[in-house]
Amino acid sequence: MRLAIFDLDNTLISGDSDHAWGEYLIRVGAVDEERYRRANDEYLRSYEAGTLDIDDYLSFSLQPLAQHPRKLLEAWRRDFMAEVIEPMVLPKAEALLDHHREAGDFLMIITATNRFVTAPIAERFKVDELIAIEVEERDGAYTGRVAGVPSFQRGKVTRLEAWLAEHPEIEREGCWFYSDSRNDLPLLEQVDRPVAVDPDPMLKIEAERRGWTVMSLR
């Protein structure tokens, strides 16, 4: 079975779910508005520039999960999915997923956003597997710390390789990876069929230089 891998933010959806979750937390009063927005915006700029310190960012972005009851977090997430994520869903992205699904491909989302935010999005897209940043849990509650290797930049390669080692039935040859971001160059370089989707300026330059497919889902 061939593998079709998709980045999530600004690839399958028209926005950044991690940053949008931060904005949602501000709206519901879960975090301090001025301090959180300033940091949230600065981290997004660093991500877009390819300079994000992932450990520093995760220590910031995962803390709200440890500061509120799980049932409340899950209620917020349901509302977030309906009010924020659903309008970001791209019809052309759904059509692309359907194309690969009909071809019998195994569909995976691999994202640098945490599983709490992205699990229902992956379920919404009906993909077969999600690799995301894992949040440590203890006694049924989130600790606000990362579990394992963050699926960011070269960490996406590490996490994918570990997953493939456990799933020998999935073919490595002929694998697609669709992404918008320069941060995904390490994984784009590893697959047979890299595709730049509405790419950021640096990725667009690299894709054109290397002869990769460039496409838009907007």
Image (cartoon, rainbow, N blue to C red):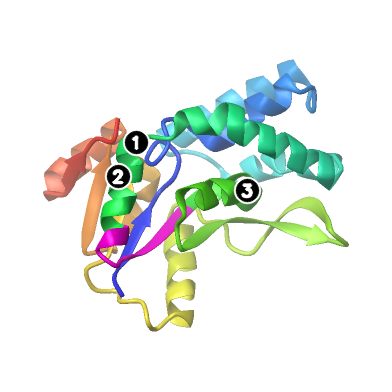
What span is colored magenta in the figure? 101-110
For residue 215, side relative to residue 26 (left or right): left
Depth order, front residue of 60/169? 169
Q: Nearer the viewer, mark 2 or mark 3?
A: 2
Measuring from the top left, give residue 88's x and y in whole percent.
46, 30
The secondary element bearing badge 1 is classed as: helix
Please name the residue shown 84% across and 61% down the image: 138
Q: Counting residues from the N terminus, which is met first, the one under dot 2 or under dot 3?
A: 3
Q: Which mark is residue 95?
A: 2
Q: Mark 3: which secondary structure?
A: helix
Q: Does residue 189 sit above or below 116 in this rendering? A: below
User: Can you see residue 96?
Assistant: yes
| Three-letter code, disc 2 | Ala
Front position in the image: 158 or 6: 6
Image x and y of residue 37, in percent: 66, 21
Q: Secondary structure at mark 2?
A: helix
CA gap, disc 3 and disc 1: 34 Å
The residue carrying mark 3 is 55
Question: How dense is the environment of label 3, judged by Cα within 10 Å: few (below 14), some, or many (20 and up)?
Answer: few
Name the residue: 52% across, 39% down.
52
| CA distance separating discs 2 and 3 | 35 Å
Q: Are marks 1 and 2 in contact (CB under 8 Å)?
A: yes
Provide the residue designation for mark 1. 91
Is residue 105 in the magenta section? yes
Answer yes or no: is residue 63 visible.
Answer: no
Task: Tell me the distance, in whole angstroms, between the alpha carbons under discs 1 and 2.
Answer: 6 Å
Task: Name which quarter of the figure residue 209 lies in.
Answer: top left
Which residue type does callout 3 highlight? Asp
- For marks 3 and 1, the one nearer the N-term is 3
Task: Answer above or below: position of 137 versus 202.
Answer: below
